[in-house]
Image (tube, rainbow, N blue to C red):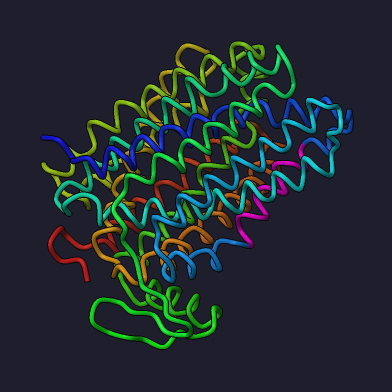
Amino acid sequence: MSLGLPFRALWTSSVSSNLADGVAFISMPLLAASLTDDPRLVAGLATTYALVRLLVALPIGVWVDRVDRRTLLIGANLIRGLVVIALAVCVHLELGNLPLLYAVFAVVGTLESAADNASVSLLPGVVPVEQLDRANGRISAAQLVADEFAGPPLGGLLFAVAAAAPLYLMGGLWAAAGLLALALPVHGLEVHGLEVRSGSSLIRRQPAVHEAMQGARWLAGNRTVGGLALIGALASVGYMLPFSILVLFAAERLHLDGLGYGVILAVSALGGLVASFATPRAIGRIGYRGTIIASLVTGAVSLFALSISTSGAIAAAILAVYILHAVAWGICATSLRQRLVPDDLRGRVNAASRVLSLLGLALGSALGGLLAVVSLPLSIAVGGGVFVCCAVLAAIVIPHDGKHN
């Protein structure tokens, strides 16, 4: 059954945006490395990106609930497209420099946060509620193909031709994502000065800080959605414990070179592709609670197995199972939030959940490095232990389907 023309508009916009993300994943660090040989400055680009997304998450959540989300999605994509095209022109004219790259990356990170939140918040108004799992699965599949399979090699190939080439493509793809979103129906709040119209009600707008805290308070007060956010933060720690040092594990334990490492990551993405189509069926059979617990247990088992692996081929298969779990968990968590969070709070609750996940990623990365000093497999095994805790927490805080309060 078709998910409808509005969903196709959102899906094609997401494909274009995520292909640009995949190109950026490879080409932006390559560009930084061409401008400096200081590894701290190259690594600092990713740090800047992460910090910006953390700092802007809550304010953006407020704006997602204040303005028309379609307009926000269109504007965020068009502006980041234009900003990156301007950078491409500077690089093409040999006027690019590291401070300019950092500034553009900060703007891109801010606008990506706005586009992502707006897109997730829009989906429940685009498809029927009973189709949310299927729609999120289709979006996840598109993200995997664009981010993991198509974007990175395309970015590397274009950079080998000319440093500005992938930037022109990224800018064009983000601008196209904005134009494709024009086909979406207008859906959002009407803003009249200091007042917001939601349905038939006219509500006086509060300061941004107060509105952001409303989302955080609602999240803390809802057992299911708050529990999902807590599990998401803990799962982010579990994710970064192995992945922060995976490149070292691949070299020292699996005896893989850079090409081999890239191959096992590409193979692992196949697990996520399977999950994007299989998860909606699993939810239909065993419900959200059962699917979430099963996925988290799968994540734990896969990391325990990876920690004792010494074969690249076996590690690739294990990582595919791990990514399968991660995508299944992501689809369940996103669909439940979309079902349970009131429309006028969706942007702020998404933002508060995102802040917890970003903090978990930072903590997991730091812990992964510390544990790896003792033993590389230890960091991965501890990640498995974290996912065991996540599964136990899910069994406690997530009620059986139909009882989400």
Q: Residue at x 67, y 50 (%)?
A: 107
Q: Is residue 202 above or below residue 14?
A: below
Q: Quadrant of the C terminus?
A: bottom left
Q: Quadrant of residue 162?
A: top right
Q: Quadrant of the N terminus?
A: top left
Q: Position of residue 226 (x, y in %)?
A: 37, 67
Residue 48 on the magenta span: yes
Q: Quadrant of residue 262?
A: top right
Q: Position of residue 335 (x, y in %)?
A: 27, 52
Q: Quadrant of residue 345?
A: bottom left
- Give the left or right position of residue 188, taking residue 150 as reference: left
- Give the left or right position of residue 39, taking residue 63 as reference: right
- Residue extent of the magenta highlight: 43-55
The single residue placed furthest to the right in the displayed view is: 37
Dominant secondary-structure state across the stretch colored magenta: helix
Q: How many marks?
A: 0
Q: Along the line of sight, which residue is nearer the eye, 291 or 66?
A: 66
Residue 351 on the magenta span: no
Q: Is residue 357 above or below residue 89?
A: below
Q: Position of residue 72 (x, y in %)?
A: 47, 57
Q: Residue at x 28, y 37 (%)?
A: 8
The single residue placed furthest to the bottom in the displayed view is: 204
